[in-house]
Image (cartoon, grey):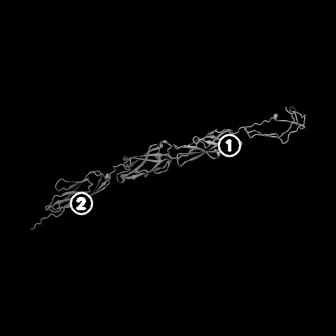
Amino acid sequence: MVQVQNVEHRPPTWQEQFAVQQFDEKTSQRFRLRAIDGDTGINKLIYYTIKTDPRDTFFSLETAPGEHNGTELVVDPIDRDYLQREVFQLSVIAYKEADNGENFSTETSIVIIVNDINDQRPVPLRQKYTIAIMEETAQSLNLEDFGFHDLDLGENARYSVQHIDVQPPSAAAAFYLSPQEGYQRQIFYMGTQDHARLDYEVAEFQDITIKVIATDLLNPSFVGETLLHIELINWNDEEPIFQQPSYNVSFKETVPKGFKVGTVVADDRDIGDKVVYSMMGNAVEYLSIDDDTGDIYVNIDNAFDYHRQSVLFVQVRADDTLGEPYHTTTAQLVIHLEDVNNTPPTLRLPRESPNVEENVPEGFEVTRGIRATDPDTTAHLRFDIDWDGSWATKQGRPTPEIEYRE
């Protein structure tokens, strides 16, 4: 009988192994591996070693109690969110040492898949944003890195966003926020949608604070917040407006130079704006206006004549000065002149001198057709004989005054 003695020439053979393991992140795990001597009847002691990426320090091997019970792959908690990795590859090598000093080994490759759990809230990319924008202007807000980041994966990384007032009330309604939902690292955009509400002349709107809130869609308790500070920039967006579209004044036609006709007032809502006044047309020939106060004065004597023109229409102009674009508005000043009895009447006598016979009775009509006119509306005409400037003749010779004067 011939007995054949086995010679060591085979590597270990795996008895317990796996190709893939999948589990939740941030949990500890242990998995058994076992190999036996590939040479029948020799049953050498099997040793194990692990080969991983040097960064993956959470994998290790622990030898199971007993000489031939294999080893355990120990996995410390893996923070998938921090690493932003879900798949890890490693190898476990089983080997034995032969009597002749030669090593025999076998290797198994393992893939570890780490499941994400919903344990992260959406975090703002910045804790605070500040921007200055023009008042009452349609625009998009140029905000750098304006967004949130949820380190989770898949549905766990989805969140909604909204913006609410901090101060003043209703400020958030002036802006839109897009999109309405985010996933992982998401940039958002804001702009004005009711820019008329953003009025610098309303003091409480000069400095606006809005809170932007991101809420996890699967866990509403996971919330991220950031503040947006908006400063409105004042610009010349308002027009000067006269307090009255038309001003009516009345005074006597004989007012002298320096007489104050009245005052026109225009208001401009722009803070820091100043209104200047001026006259338009040929009114500058007889009127002047204080460009600061709007007071209007007569600048020459004998400027008016009721009989030439009893009602005057003057255009007054107001200009703002805050900056481009400049604005101009006008109002009408209506001057009603009051007639003054300052024009003598005009007397018209018959063409021929009157003749009368002597010894006519009292009350005899000497002549008719004496007419008098006066353009002054306040004039009240009365006729009298100017005896000092009157005379009579009889047969070509002067007649004594006693004969014809009462």
Q: Is residue 274 visible?
A: yes
Residue 368 picture location, percent across and down = 84, 39
Q: Nearer the viewer, residue 269 or 202?
A: 269
Give the quarter of the image for residue 16.
bottom left
Q: In this view, which residue lies farthest toward the left?
A: 1
Quadrant for the N terminus in the image: bottom left
The image shows residue 111, relative to residue 209, as above or below, that is below
The image shows residue 390, relative to residue 138, as above or below, that is above
**Residue at 68% over, 43% down:** 311
Quadrant for the C terminus in the image: top right
Label 1 secondary element: strand
Residue 228 picture location, percent across and down = 42, 46
Question: How far is disc 2 from disc 1 in space, using C-alphas?
Answer: 111 Å
Q: In this view, which residue lies farthest toward the front?
A: 397
The reply, left or right, for residue 348 in relation to residue 293 is right
The reply, left or right, for residue 352 in relation to residue 262 is right
Which residue has dot 1 on it? 311
Label 2 secondary element: strand
Residue 53 picture location, percent across and down = 26, 56
The reply, left or right, for residue 299 in relation to residue 198 is right
Q: Amino acid at mark 1?
A: Val
Which residue has dot 2 on it? 108
Mark 2 in CB contact with mark 1 (< 8 angstroms): no
Give the quarter of the image for residue 44.
bottom left
